[in-house]
Amino acid sequence: MRNFASEEGANHTATKLAFYIRLISRYLDLSRLDGVTVAYDYDVALAELDRGVEGLRPLTRSNDDQLIGVGMAPAVLRDGVVKVHIVLNAPYVEEIDKDEGDEPNEEFWAALYLLAHECGHVQVTSDKDRAFPGMILQHAVSNYEEAIFMQVNEACWEEYAACRLSAAFGRGRLQLYEESLRGVLGVARERAADARKDFWSHRDLNRAVAEVAPPLVEPLRLASYVLGHIDGSGDDGSMSEETEQAIADAGYTDFVDDLAKALRSLWEIKREWTHTSQFDIIGDVARDALWSGGLTIRPAANDGATINVWEPDEVDPIDMGLEKTWSATGAPNSDTA
């Protein structure tokens, strides 16, 4: 408990959190839970978390005009065992102790769900470590293209699975997830277009990947939250017409449909995973989304990547083969990063 105003307040909140963690552990496997940090200095707590591995970049939360991170469940290595340490932004869980007397308010349910969702990540990580021992925090990926799409695979799968596992605790959560999804869908194409426009000036391919790819892939990550919650709720939830229309307006209907099939198929065989390449079906959806936004990333020699950037409105994708790259004027151009 970090930076609480009083020891008494910290102890009271900690006792309540411990009670609900024990409750959640009846439904989720928390055997790999390393510990829980609740911090009013949330950003500092993330940066200072000891993950048990040297050389990792300090953790940072999402913090922009679309999303603000309030909880994280990163993997840590303790005596050779992969565990998960939950870090929570204190103001968002302090209402967890308002469950006495009157009917719990919406702030209580939001706090409980935040806790349950992060606990869901504990089980997701432990399930994956048991399937693929020696990979999490212990296997370095040197291939540029593989590293990029592995991040997409992990982000979409982990949020889908954590949401599916914690859906029973998520009163009113679907509407909030859909609002977040609609928010990123509304700006995805515009932000990618701005980044492509900048590329023709700076010609930095690594920068192009860093600026064009995220807005095109982020709707897939946010859709994973929605799909996971719906699938975990059974017949109690479905996507709203407003969200389906926003997906269609952004040109993401096929991508979200394909993502849903990929995630659900992985869930069905989660006891039978044999190799991490099985998760590449998620990355394939991301490749299609990037293609639609004027960007392809393909493996190249020496663990590099061939990166293609073009203006989708200026090139007919039927006439354009994957072996071609296009400059702003439509002339073939090939670069490797």
Image: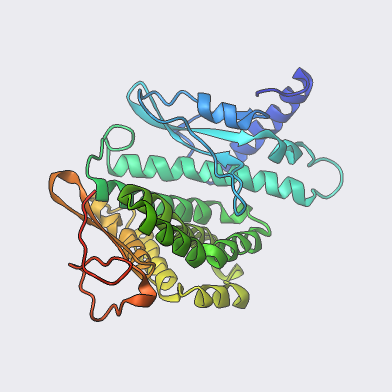
The residue at the far right in this view is 102
Q: Nearer the viewer, residue 322 or 87?
A: 322
Q: Which color scheme did the rendering employ for the protein?
A: rainbow
Residue name at image x 73 percent, y 24 percent = 4
Residue 103: give x, y in percent of width and height.
83, 50
Residue name at image x 59 percent, y 32 percent = 43
Q: Nearer the viewer, residue 186 or 331?
A: 331
Q: Is residue 246 visible?
A: yes
Residue 61 vertical placement versus 43 (above, below): below
Residue 306: give x, y in percent of width and height.
21, 55
Q: Nearer the viewer, residue 242 or 82?
A: 242
The residue at the far left in this view is 301
Q: Which image quadrant: the N terminus?
A: top right
Residue name at image x 52 percent, y 54 percent = 163
Residue 106: give x, y in percent of width and height.
76, 52
Residue 18: give x, y in percent of width and height.
64, 31
From the viewer's perspective, is 172 left or right of 62? right
From the viewer's perspective, is 326 left or right of 5? left
- Image mark count: 0
Q: Nearer the viewer, residue 233 or 7?
A: 7
Residue 315 vertical placement versus 67 (above, below): below
Q: Is residue 231 visible?
A: no
**Quarter of the figure with residue 24:** top right
From the viewer's perspective, is 69 left or right of 57? right
